[in-house]
Image (cartoon, helix red, strand yellow):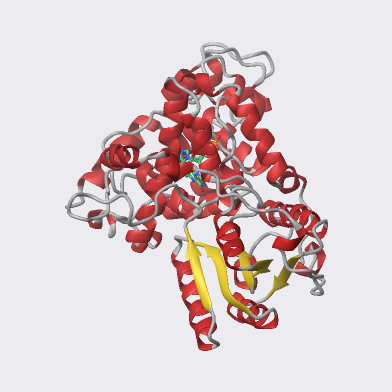
Amino acid sequence: RTTLCWLRRDLRLGDHAALAHAQGAGRVLAAFVFDPTLLTGLAPDDARVALIWHSLLEIRQRLRALGSDLAILYGDPAAAIPRLAARIRAHTVFAARDYEPAARARDERVAALLAADGRALELVKDQVVFDTGEVLTREGKPYTVFTPYARAWRARLSPADTGSLAVRLAPDAFLPWRDDEMVSLATLGFADNPIGRAHAGEAAAAQRLAAFEAKIADYHAARDYPAQGGTSQLSAALRFGTVSIRALARTALAHDGAGAQAWLNELVWRDFYQQLLWHFPQVEAGSFKPAFRTLRWPGEEAHFEAWKTGQTGYPLIDAAMRELLQTGWMHNRLRMVVASFLTKDLLIDWRRGEAHFARHLLDFDLAANNGGWQWAASTGCDAQPWFRIFNPVTQSQKFDPDGAYIRRWVPELAALDARAVHAPWQAKALPDGFLLGRDYPAPIVDHAAQRERALALYGKQP
Ligand code: FAD
């Protein structure tokens, strides 16, 4: 018997739910489909496409060594997957469950077409520790507040939930195959991207995890300081599944102490937002809280441009926004601060910020991004209360005290001292030759005044 394993955001061969299940049902052919509807509109050198591509090549090389291959297809999966399943006479197609509305609709189409041909699509849990129906309130309802969700999540956790789903890497476990599709980055219309390439593959993800494990004990203390590099930077690896969530949870659980506990808590946040998107798919379109759905954002277009390009005159904001453009990553503290700044200082619709992040983040994930934006904009479930507004200068003084992070990304401010670098317009003295407004922008808005406007805007809602 043969089975087809359809890889999507699980681009690895180790600890792999869909592959492990597929192997239980027969000899496996693994396949990946580049879906033109997902590629349309991306920049021709999009780092995520390169990340996917190089991860696929790593898998392909390992499968070829076993006499099999990774079938790399291009087209509508609803056509490509049933066609390939028929060609190899696979009775079942295995894939990891996806929680995004568009992916759910796609999977329903594929399942219906397979069923019409006497075959089945079997979706298995891989992306999360607990699936959407596994952590529910006593009434059987989804949680919409994080703390009780996390408590229930931890109470349910047993070693079986994080055990490795081993894949047998032996020639007789895979279908002898040679891919004849000739898909390449170039035929897809994309150029290579060194950032995507550097993040690609299971081996690179394992290295990142090992490097982070060496400092996991300090995570709770270091995690809020962008200059310290105290977080794992595994988000892109998790997004594309070059590492399994179970491997990360096992790492956290293997260590005692506040650092590992705090890190596990972040993994729970990830599960929380995935289940939220599944149960409340309407969050993709707008505010979770109905009261904020009609809010009219009065922000200015020029301010949005300044925010996107890191030219707001608020050094911490500008450093973070420039890091995003240059690397595709941004520290969590800064994601919260720049999102608050866009919505509550510039009074611009959070969905525009969400879209900018979606375009540029290497780790872009609909559930986490939407959850993070709605948290910061105070429109989400269990969000920051709307009257709590980050002050971009005090955040800067607190979390980048000597300005090291700012100086790395805003070189115009390199010569400013540790006091002036957070708010050059307030400085008593600036370095000789440095002119505010010429060498670096004066602030585009006044935080205190905008804060009052935001309070009035939010306060007007029912
Ligand atoms: P670590 O601190 O090492 O955390 C480990 C892992 O836990 C992360 O890799 C991530 O998978 C998960 N995680 C951590 N924090 C969160 C969180 N708050 N919500 C959900 N999962 C979390 N994360 C994304 O993966 N993709 C996004 O598109 C995304 N957009 C965000 C937008 C905003 C406005 C905010 C405030 C947060 C967003 N996050 C997003 C969450 C978080 O900022 C990133 O996961 C984190 O910064 C990634 O860095 P790391 O891997 O070093 O994290």
Q: Position of residue 105 (x, y in %)?
A: 46, 73
Residue in front for this viewpoint, 195 or 108: 108
Q: Can residue 228 be seen from the camera position used here?
A: yes
State the residue at coordinates (50%, 43%): 163
Q: Quarter-wise, where is residue 6 in the image? A: bottom right
Q: Is residue 445 visible?
A: no
Depth order, front residue of 144/130: 130
Q: Is residue 380 left or right of residue 444?
A: left
Q: Classify the position of the N terminus by image quarter.
A: bottom right
Residue located farthest toward the bottom when viewing the structure as drawn? 116
Q: Residue 453: percent from the left, percent from the top?
A: 30, 41
Residue 101 image offset from top left, x and y in percent:
44, 66
Residue 203 lies, in percent from the top left, at 72, 41
Residue at image position (50%, 28%) is 254
Residues 138 and 163: in front is 163
Query: Taking 351 as reference, is 220 above or below it?
Result: above
- Judged left or right of residue 214, residue 451 is left
Q: How many numbered badges does the structure rendering display? A: 0
- Residue drawn at x 41%, y 52% is 274
